[in-house]
Image (cartoon, rainbow, N blue to C red):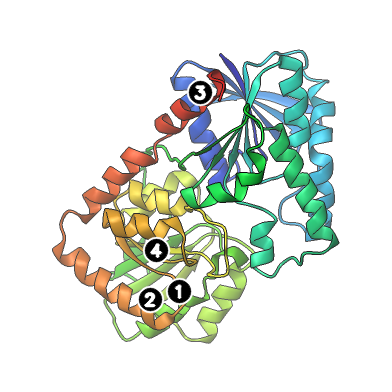
Amino acid sequence: MRLALIADAYPPMRSSGAVQLRDLSKEFLRQGFLTTVLVPSAELDVPWLLEEMNGVQVLRLKAPQTKDIGYVRRTACELLMPFMMLRNLQKSPLAKESWDGVVWYSPTIFLGPIVNVLKKASKCRSYLIIRDIFPEWAVDMGLLSRGLAYRFFKVVESYQYSVADVIGVQTLANLSYFDHWMQSDQQRLEVLQNWLADEPDTGCSIVVAEGPLAGRKIFVYAGNMGVAQGMDVLLDLAENLQGRKDIGFLFVGRGHDAERLRSKAETSGLNNVVFYDEIDPAEIPGLYAQCHIGLVALDTRHKTHNIPGKFLSYMQYGLPVLATINPGNDLEALIKTERVGRVCSDASAETLLQQAEELLNTITVDSEISSRCKSLSARLFSPKVAVNQIISALRSPK
């Protein structure tokens, strides 16, 4: 079975999406499926570049820059992206390739045109992995009104869904959003859990024992620091715990809010907080080996639901979590049912402080909590489970 896996992020990018696609492609290969990743690249000075990474064939196609630019320019570039990918695909050695299935990853919502062309040319089924629901979350965050731009994004979103034979969403709570899409007997909707492959601990460039947080129990946040995360409450928590010299907060990553949060911590004189720039994903196991509790933050204005990739990585390496998330998120029930941390959904610094102190007490007496985290990761969030589910959906009619 020959698969095309299409996304706008793949290593050497360090985003959680890039890591997920790397792990998924490696698992497809491990199970014997010939997989080619098609990914746009603004860095190319040629139309295409075909390479191999860890045994996986990767075709990079020249396309406009869509990362770390303004919203208006980004929208224009993302709109052009699939068409430029198609044009440069036709110049590549894979122009006439036939596929047995097309799998693609959202965000972005703009890959529908290239998926549709490949699907029709190969007369195969397609599987959309959707990890956030845009533009709805942008409206929830106040980044977008329900005006002309919103209606434009809704058209693009609807087209993407129309191309899919199967859609895999992150949580049960997301299923109701797609009720309108389930109009054809040939369409299928299901929950596809996130996934993350095991990686060995090869060390980390961040050495906690050599910094200002040495000897403390470490709360760690590793990942994107953006509007969708609503991370100010985590700094409020750090301020409330500043009197405890046995506790420290480590923030590692990048994003639109990273510099603002760093400046806020400095202005507030938070000597229990340290910020580091983004590190290579291969260093994450070494980072977590030095920490005690993983932090998850989702802005409480969210009305759609997701299970962040960082939650998976905390579970994988046995870190219980302290989470502040939007009300009704499926993640709340998961954390409570599996007993892998503490969670609050009211954006209250007081509630979060209470939960943090409870969790600190728990990890000193509950010797099994780390094992429960690892067990949950293996049971629900492995690439093997995800690949089995995707292949089953591609092979079978609804």
Circle nearer the N terminus (1, 3): 1
Q: Residues within 10 Å of mark 1 (few under 14, many from 20)?
A: many
Q: Is residue 81 visible?
A: yes
Q: Residues within 10 Å of mark 4 (few under 14, many from 20)?
A: many
Between the C-alphas of marks 4 and 1, the distance is 11 Å
Nearer mark to the viewer, of 4 and 1: 1
Is there a contact, CB below 8 Å, between mark 1 and mark 3?
Answer: no
User: Which residue has dot 4 on it?
Assistant: 220
Figure quadrant of the C terminus: top right
Nearer mark to the viewer, of 3 and 2: 3
- 16 sits to left or right of 39: left
Q: Which mark is residue 391?
A: 3
- 140 sits to left or right of 45: left
Q: Position of residue 299 (x, y in %)?
A: 54, 68
Q: Which mark is residue 234?
A: 1
The structure residue drawn at horizontal position 52% and vertical position 76%, both measured from the top left corner, is 232
* Numbered disc 2: secondary structure: helix
Is there a contact, CB below 8 Å, between mark 3 and mark 2?
Answer: no
Badge 1 amino acid: Leu
Give 97 or 188, whichever is nearer the viewer.
188
The structure residue drawn at horizontal position 32% and vertical position 39%, both measured from the top left corner, is 378
* Numbered disc 4: secondary structure: strand
Between the C-alphas of marks 3 and 2, the distance is 41 Å
Nearer mark to the viewer, of 2 and 4: 2
Between the C-alphas of marks 2 and 1, the distance is 8 Å
Badge 2 amino acid: Leu
The structure residue drawn at horizontal position 14% and vertical position 65%, both measured from the top left corner, is 365
Nearer mark to the viewer, of 2 and 1: 2
Give 67 or 97, whichever is nearer the viewer.
97
Q: Which mark is residue 352?
A: 2
Task: Please tell me in which quadrant of the rendered image residue 185 appears.
Answer: top right
